[in-house]
Image (cartoon, helix red, strand yellow):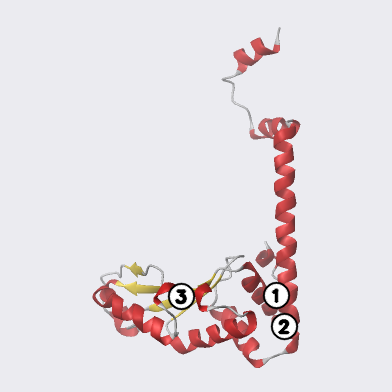
Amino acid sequence: MSRSTASRWLRDVPLTHAQEGRLRERNPAISGQIAGAQRNAERARERRRGYQEHGRALARRGEPLHIAGVTLYWAEGEKASRNAARISNADPALLRLFLAFLRSTFAVSDEQVRVTCHLFTDHAAHQDAIEHYWLDELALQQASLTRSIVNQASRRSSGKRARMLPQGTCRLTVNSTFVVQSIFGSIQEYGGMERPEWLG
């Protein structure tokens, strides 16, 4: 029987994942793509490792602003992203301090900073005023502002949250693998621990 006949007869037979994997491995084009993707992933991982080593070296200097900024991120920052530093809070003084740390340590410019306001439905009528409040507090321009997120409060808590957080909360984001991985390295150095999941 010819291959073409067998192929035609069997084309509707489903393959298991293992069988599909073996076929991919035997296909030089696909196996080359997989190998290339693996090499790229390993190179990116090594870059992240180097950025973490940079952070560890900074931590060993023990400079007060660096200690403060890294500690804030350890407590309040987002640890899920390998490529962006994000921190949210309702206290503008805390966010100003974190911005000062970013500017001093990493020469982060205002153009690199993104501001996202997290509001509740009670805030909707004053959204523009709240957005400008955060921009003014952080000495940033309108270009830094991204679209605000408005959360629907439950009936039981309606109005209470707005009174507790009259300006909502603000999230600062800097999209930089170098910045966030350096911070991760510093946290591990200060804490005397390892977090391999931060490396990815």
Residue at point 30%, 84% (across, down): 163
Query: What is the CA distance from the residue labelled 1 to the residue labelled 2?
Result: 9 Å
Residue at point 65%, 88% (across, down): 67
Q: Which residue is mark 1?
A: 185
Decide: few, some or many residues near mark 2? Use Cα within 10 Å; few <14, some 14-19, many ≥20: some
Decide: few, some or many residues near mark 1? Use Cα within 10 Å; few <14, some 14-19, many ≥20: many
Where is residue 22, by image quadrant?
top right
Q: Nearer the viewer, mark 1 or mark 2?
A: 2
Contact check, label 1 and label 3, Cβ < 8 Å: no
Q: Which residue is mark 2?
A: 58
Above or below, 150 relative to 159: above
Residue in the foreground of this view, choosing between 49 and 144: 144
- Percent across and percent down for residue 60 are 75, 85
Query: Mark 1 or mark 3: which comes first in sequence?
Result: 3
Query: What is the CA distance from the residue labelled 2 to the residue labelled 3?
Result: 25 Å
Query: Mark 2 or mark 3: which comes first in sequence?
Result: 2
